[in-house]
Amino acid sequence: MSAYTNILFIVFCLVLTVQRSFANTIPICVDCEITTITEGVSVAMEYDTLLINKGVYKEFNILIDKPLTLLGQDYPIIDGEDKGEIIRIISDHVTLDGLFIINVGTSYTSDYAAIRVVKSEHFLIQNVVLEKLFFGIYLEKSSQGRIFHNKIIGDAIDEYNSGNGIQLWHSHNVEVDRNIVRGVRDGIYLEFSDNITINNNTSTDNLRYGLHFMFSNDDVYTNNTFENNGAGVAVMFSKRIKMYKNNFRKNWGTASYGMLLKEINDAEIKDNIFEENTIGINIEGSNRITYTKNDFVSNGWAVKVLGACYANTFSQNNFLYNSFDISYNSKLNDNTFEQNYWSDYTGYDLNKDGIGDVPYRPVKLFSYIVNRTPETIVLLRSLFMDIIDFSEKVSPIFTPDNLMDANPLMKRQYDRN
């Protein structure tokens, strides 16, 4: 950086500091000089704070076009009366804090949102409650922002006339942290959004996905809970994803799963819990992924591997009481299973080193049959099933003969109870 550029940067910072030092707080209430939020935005100078007192403000299409803070006292209600979008931010350095927003308009041609951020940076949306919404928080070509500690509660019934709780489109370097999202179409949705961190959120009881993202790279997801959603979580057409310490629970249905991976490459899935899902992880066309220290507990299928999945590694996972641990639709195997714990393993450990002396074959012939003829699931846990599984274990014909865990663990690892 040149000396001239340094001077310009210092001058800019000084001007910004001076601007903020002269910022005012403008009260808004029924008995105040300013009685509406729209009027408050209009008269405010840059970096002012609008202090919105408790009450009901029947407003929509509030346009924030300058750096401002909208601070609610005792959660003032902004009621859009189903007329359209409620707040639109088109400026950098905007903060929304402590608001209760209801009655977003529904449209089949426009994605009306309670809060929309457009081509903005350095925004903060926190401590906001959204109810009776279409879309909740919608980011469009925005970056360097934070969505923190909000509660988004929808009443969606059908996918075609409902929106998503938190949506990011062509947005980058955003933190989505400690939000509760329930009763919308997709709890959290990302498209063409890179370098996003999604932490400590709870996304439950949504019509379709708790989390859904496509064409979004270098994102990190930690300590989230995705429970009782229509189809679980969908992760598609993305690279270098990291998913740590998330809970995928009770996502049941004929086409449901804890997580769907489609065309995902060079990712890491570690320390997650997949519990009581129809399918724990459904994998298709995904390569070079490491699955480490995850718990697969009481799922229909723990892992279902479809076509074109190569160079994936499963190690140190716990496979506990699943109807099927691994389902595979090919005789070719280019994936590694090493030192996992399998609750169905019946081998022995003569030298007491904690590793079974007999390899474990996790793919059962019966799962191969069910994949092709779903009606045969009625024979689950029957004597017939046990006989055919034993015969395939002795002499593999329909399943990959090299798909095995050569060093299965004798004891469960990483007990999280």
Image: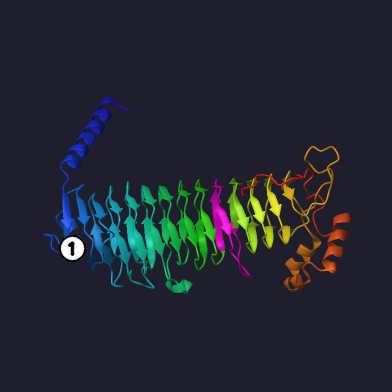
Q: Is residue 14 visible?
A: yes
- Magenta segment, which residues? 232-259
Residue 367 percent coordinates (x, y): 76, 63
| Colouring scheme applied when the structure was drawn | rainbow
Compared to residue 55, the image places residue 4 above or below, namely above
Q: Position of residue 62 (x, y in %)?
A: 24, 62
* 216 in the magenta segment: no
Residue placed farthest to the left in the image? 33
Helix, strand or loop for disc 1 = loop
Is 40 above or below relative to 161? above
Quadrant in which the N terminus is drawn: top left
Q: Is residue 253 magenta?
A: yes
Residue at the image point whose x is 39% and y is 53% from the top: 149
Q: Residue at x 40, y 62 (%)?
A: 152
Q: Position of residue 173 (x, y in %)?
A: 41, 46
Query: Residue 271 vs residue 333: left or right?
Result: left
Relative to 334, 263 lies left or right: left
Give the residue type that dot 1 points to: Thr
On the picture, is 152 further left or further right than 45? right
Q: Residue at x 79, y 71 (%)?
A: 379
Above or below, comparing residue 339 to residue 29 in the picture: above
Image quadrant assignment for residue 39: bottom left
In depth, the one of 120 and 56 nearer the eye is: 56
User: Quarter-wise, where is residue 61 in the image?
Assistant: bottom left
Seen from the viewer's position, the closer of residues 322 and 145 is 322
Count the marks: 1
Q: Give the residue at the far front of this rendering.
A: 417
Residue denoted by label 1: 36
Which residue appears at 85% of the width and 67% of the height?
Answer: 383
